[in-house]
Amino acid sequence: MKVVLRQVCRALGLVVALAAPPVVFASSDPLIDALPVGGAGVGFLWGYNRSPYQGAQSSRDNLPLYLYEGERAYLHGTRLGLKFNAEDWRFDAFLNYRFEGFNRDNVPTSMAGLGVREPGWDAGVSLRRRMDWGTPYVEALHDVSNSSDGTELRAGYWNEWRRGRLSLKPHLMAGWRSASLNNHYYGTPTYEAGAGIDLHAALYARYALTESWSLYGSIGTTRHSSEITSSPVARGGLQNEMFVGFLYDWSPKQARWAPESKPLIVKALYGNSSDCDMLQIMRFSCTTRHTVDNTDIAALHVGRMLIDSPDGWPVQLAGFIGAQRHLEKAYQDDFWSVMAFFKAYWYGFPWDKYVRTRVAIGSGLSYSEQISTMELRDQAKHDRGNWKLLNYMDPSIDFRVARRSYLGVGVSHRSGEFGKSQFFGNVNGGSNYIYVSIETTLR
């Protein structure tokens, strides 16, 4: 396992900037060039920051990372985008999560009774050029989540210094924030925030442990404009943050162990709601369904195999996207959710030559256009809020019934990170559906 970190480190060193909760402008995508085209990786980050709000505790945050680098499209932690390259120039159009504000379960005392100021989603474009002395960039973002309706214009600079396995990346940025953006997060009935310029500086360090494993650390600080610091709910002084994490890059393995061809994998499933925990279902110690509500799901997943039987080992790795229809019966209108995830398989059972049996676990992101009855009930028990974007998991077991087809059972699971992730709305709970499925590979 001597192949686990150099590229991962690169990817993670860049990733953390995106994922950390206090990173109001999070940089112009530090994950650019972190993975080769067709590469994929996963990781995890732990962050700490000084909240910009008075009466708020310093924040600790967790964030799982999912990375994919395509020919034109990419997923970089909390950024989904399209890219266009021409020599040293690069243009991006993207959707980016804004780590700012708070939800109903983490209201600072200074904001009590003033309404929730939730994080949002920005659509943006960026242009950067690689030079001998570094990489300057410009970026424009606008809220598309009906949160602030605000705009931010950024100009920044990256550089990189390498020594052996260690890489240091300094980053400087200035961001002009519109009045609607500042006022949404820091305005009060007696104070209206105007437009202003924030300044940000950070240093990212990464260390390549192996070919695929990387460790990362960063420190940074933000100087907010007087339009923000003059607000009665805002703290003065600098907003400091630090992050540590790791990332595993599958790219080296993909280059060596990718299947000769990558035919389309199609999986259809139908499931029933279950009040059992996911781990209980995986151990078969609880498999009851429709015990509280009789809601169901129907889903279609499509994907491709990324790694197949490396060095003869009975393991596989695939990447999937999916669409799921929530059948809410009489509780509320039916609705859709979508997901993107990686899935790892193991098939080394002694009876493999008779009936190939695979156990698998999938992990990724799920976005739902509404909150399911099960999740509404689960969060209401603890008087906590809900979130449309959650972590997605898909444990399963299946059996080959034809040359390229499998019949299986599994769990479609959505949840937060035990209330520890701002990216997932600090949700502590979720939903489980026990399903049956049929999967086939189209050559």
Image (cartoon, rainbow, N blue to C red):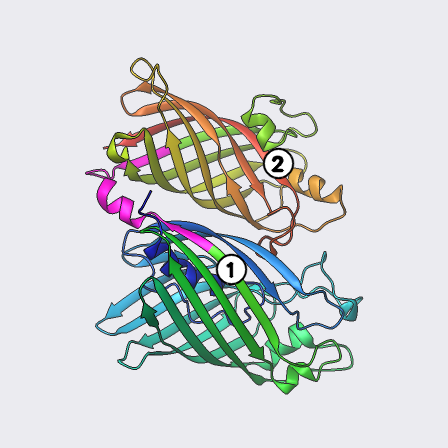
Disc 1 marks which residue?
Answer: 244
Instruction: Say whether residue 260 is magenta.
Output: yes
Kindly report which numbered mark, 2 or 1, lies closer to the viewer in this rendering: 1
Residue 67 visible from this viewpoint: yes
**Residue 383, image x and y in percent?**
76, 47
Element class at badge 2: loop
Amino acid bearing label 2: Glu
**Residue 159, image x and y in percent?**
36, 76
Identify the residue at horizontal 64%, vertical 53% (top origin).
426
**Residue 318, image x and y in percent?**
35, 39
176 relative to 94 in the view: left or right: right
**Residue 251, image x and y in percent?**
30, 49
Residue 261 falls in image quadrant: top left
Disc 2 marks which residue?
Answer: 328
Residue 193 visible from this viewpoint: no
Relative depth, front residue between 395 and 443:
395
Is the residue 327 above or below the residue 129 in the image? above
> Can you tell which mark lies on residue 85?
none
Query: Would you call the spot at circle 2 few (<14 residues within 10 Å), some (14-19), or many (20 or more)?
Result: some
Q: Magenta residues, as a range?
A: 246-266
Q: Are marks 2 and 1 in contact (CB under 8 Å)?
A: no
